[in-house]
Amino acid sequence: MDQARQTEVLTSLRRTRSHIINALDGTNENSNVIKDIDHFVKVLNETPLDQITEKDVDYHFSIIKAEINCSLNCFTHALNAIK
């Protein structure tokens, strides 16, 4: 392995790692699927059933689906970063 190839591989690994961290990051509560799921579970467990509408369920599911899609994009970028 020459120096140029080592640099290329290290760059690929750094980018891959970064994308995976972005997909799994639990520190940003505004953009993390696990925290969104946990929040919705808390809402369902702490809110009287007669106060939860189907619109509420659809809203929370749409947020969770969007976050899953974002995570999938991060994993796709991680795969593409490996050269």
Image (spheres, grey):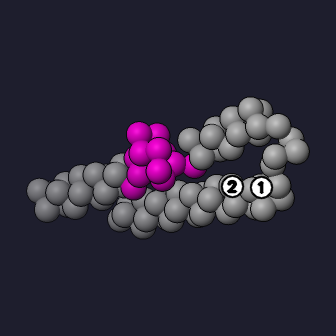
Judged left or right of residue 49, residue 61 is: left
Mark 2 sits on what residue?
Answer: 60
Does dot 1 land on a helix, a strand or a loop?
A: helix
Does dot 2 land on a helix, a strand or a loop?
A: helix
Residue type at numbered disc 2:
His
Gap in Å between the C-alphas at discs 1 and 2?
5 Å
Mark 1 sits on what residue?
Answer: 57
For the N terminus, the image quarter is bottom left
Residue closer to the observer: 14 or 67: 67
Q: Residue 67, relative to residue 41: is it above or below?
A: below
**44 part of magenta stretch:** no
Q: Residue 4, how many percent across, how many down?
A: 14, 62
**26 part of magenta stretch:** yes
Residue type at numbered disc 1:
Val
Residue closer to the observer: 23 or 46: 46
Residue closer to the observer: 12 or 58: 58
In the picture, the disc for residue 83 is none
Q: Residue furthest right?
A: 50
**Viewer can see residue 22:** yes
Give the magenta part as a residue range: 19-33
**Viewer can see residue 1:** no
For the C terminus, the image quarter is bottom left
Q: Residue 34, how many percent across, how many down?
A: 58, 42
Q: What residue appears at the point 37 percent right and 63 percent down from the top-left corner? A: 81
CB under 8 Å between discs 1 and 2: yes
Q: Residue 26, how many percent across, how many down?
A: 46, 40
Residue count near mark 1 (Cα–Cα under 10 Å), binned few <14, some 14–19, many ≥20? few
Q: Residue 10, how many percent across, how many down?
A: 24, 52
Judged left or right of residue 73, residue 62 is: right
